[in-house]
């Protein structure tokens, strides 16, 4: 119980400090790691050594990946190629809500940051709808769509630590063969949720919803050749083409593969950019990537200290007395997500804590990953920085943001949880 009390106190203080004093997640998590280590009986020296080891472990795993994603994102933004991508999508899909959700979904994975994808899409979505209320719906869909793919598809900073900890003999290709269709179904459910809500709202207001939009607001890309903007898509195409080469030709491990494909994507983006844009993009993306990397490193430090304290052996075993073992990854991830709000941090800490436990051997690897992903989506509220970003960009009140952001993500998490349980009990047993 001492470990559990230390864990609860640590999460509570991380939440309080983050909300009350707006402390950087890195320092809040490092402080939480020191506090937890001391409360659990570790010496200060042992705690600090654990923090250093945890930071180093996470930096080595994510440094190249996140920097490359930031390079791709910044170069796309500087060259207005995000508008070109959305314009290309618009040639085949004319429905603005679908465009918004799908754009967020597609950009979040190669950019390795759902928040960055949302920020890039924010000014573009203004051109799809001039009505403020409808434009805000597009922003919500872009945010939720980016989170759906970010929480489920390999390789993202959420799924990578989970796959490394629990993947076992499963290859990323096999996992994504399940995760991509599942994420698209979840995204379709979110779009249906918004459509039903808008339909009910229009019905209550006595408005007849037109079957075709009265006005067609199109994203106008910068002048260039008609058709597909291949230069804008080139980094993503390079990443996709490098995946089978890594597996079937070079026979790389999962860790080597993910670093290689992101390097290829970043090099492709750099090689196609002008010298002026290339220099500006590199200088600006380093700052952005550094902030993301160090926040995740703080999570690695806390997770490493938690494991070294003996928390895993003492507490997780007791949890199985109150809840089924198959729900432990889900509940633990939901608690961590509620406390600090970052899906990546949740994944890193949960992977660190649960790896090596009996839970890993009791549940199928794919199911564990889905359970943690589901748990990371359940409570996206005041501790979630993305929540406040969406609130600021939409200008809506807290209740509206909860209804249009927190609730759809929570429903997505519940849907992923149901699929995970069905796979565990109906397929893998």
Image (cartoon, helix red, strand yellow):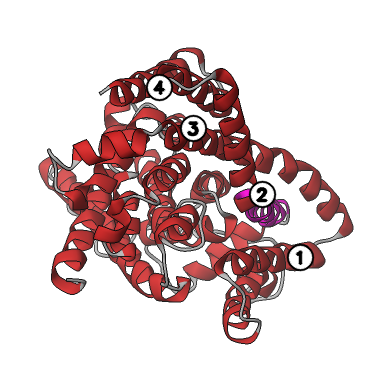
Q: Which mark is residue 63?
A: 2
Q: Quadrant of the N terminus?
A: top left
Closer mark to the observer between disc 3 and disc 1 = 3
Q: Secondary structure at mark 1?
A: helix
Q: 10 Å neighbourhood of mark 4: few (<14), some, or many (≥20)? A: some
At label 2, counting other C-alpha atoms closer than 10 Å, the crowd grade (few under 14, some 14-19, many 20 or more) is some
Mark 3 falls on what kind of element? helix
Magenta segment boundaries in residue numbering: 62-78
- Is 314 on the left or on the right of 46, as rendered? left
Q: Which residue in the structure is indicated by mark 1?
A: 267
In the rendered image, the vertical position of residue 234 relative to residue 145, given as above or below: below
In the image shown, does 109 or 332 lie closer to the viewer?
Answer: 332
Name the residue nearer the viewer: 238 or 121: 238
Residue 405 visible to the viewer: no
Where disc 4 sits, the SS reads: loop
Residue sticking out furthest to the bottom: 249
């Amino acid at each position: 119980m001492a470990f559990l009390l230390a864990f609860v106190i640590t999460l509570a203080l991380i939440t309080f400090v983050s909300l009350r004093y707006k402390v950087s997640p890195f320092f809040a998590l490092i402080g939480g790691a020191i506090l937890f280590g001391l409360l659990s009986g570790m010496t200060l020296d042992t705690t600090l050594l654990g923090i250093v080891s945890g930071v180093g472990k996470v930096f080595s795993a994510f440094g190249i990946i996140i920097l490359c994603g930031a390079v791709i994102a910044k170069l796309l933004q500087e060259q207005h190629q995000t508008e070109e991508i959305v314009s290309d999508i618009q040639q085949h899909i004319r429905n603005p809500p679908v465009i918004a959700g799908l754009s967020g979904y597609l950009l979040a994975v190669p950019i390795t940051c759902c928040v960055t994808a949302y920020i890039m899409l924010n000014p573009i979505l203004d051109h799809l709808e001039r009505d403020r209320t409808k434009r805000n719906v597009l922003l919500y869909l872009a945010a939720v769509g980016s989170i759906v793919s970010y929480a489920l598809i390999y390789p993202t900073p959420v799924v990578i630590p989970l796959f490394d900890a629990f993947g076992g003999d499963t290859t990323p290709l096999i996992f994504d063969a399940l995760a991509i269709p599942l994420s698209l179904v979840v995204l379709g459910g979110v779009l249906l949720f918004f459509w039903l809500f808008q339909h009910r709202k229009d019905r209550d207001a006595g408005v007849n919803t037109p079957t075709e939009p009265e006005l067609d607001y199109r994203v106008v890309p910068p002048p260039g050749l008609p058709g597909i903007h291949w230069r804008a898509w080139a980094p993503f195409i390079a990443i996709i083409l490098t995946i089978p080469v890594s597996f079937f030709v070079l026979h790389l491990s999962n860790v080597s593969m993910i670093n290689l494909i992101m390097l290829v994507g970043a090099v492709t983006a750099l090689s196609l950019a002008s010298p002026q844009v290339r220099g500006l993009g590199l200088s600006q993306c380093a700052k952005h990537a550094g902030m993301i990397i160090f926040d995740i490193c703080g999570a690695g430090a806390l997770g490493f200290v938690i494991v070294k304290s003996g928390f895993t052996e003492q507490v997780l075993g007791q949890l199985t007395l109150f809840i089924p073992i198959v729900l432990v990854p889900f509940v633990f991830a939901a608690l961590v997500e509620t406390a600090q709000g970052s899906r990546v941090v949740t994944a890193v800490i949960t992977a660190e804590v649960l790896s090596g436990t009996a839970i890993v051997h009791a549940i199928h690897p794919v199911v564990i990953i889905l359970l943690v992903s589901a748990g990371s989506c359940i409570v996206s509220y005041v501790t979630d920085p993305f929540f406040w970003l969406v609130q600021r960009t939409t200008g809506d009140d807290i209740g509206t943001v909860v209804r249009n952001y927190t609730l759809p993500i929570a429903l997505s998490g519940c849907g992923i949880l149901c699929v995970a349980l069905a796979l565990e009990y109906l397929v893998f047993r």
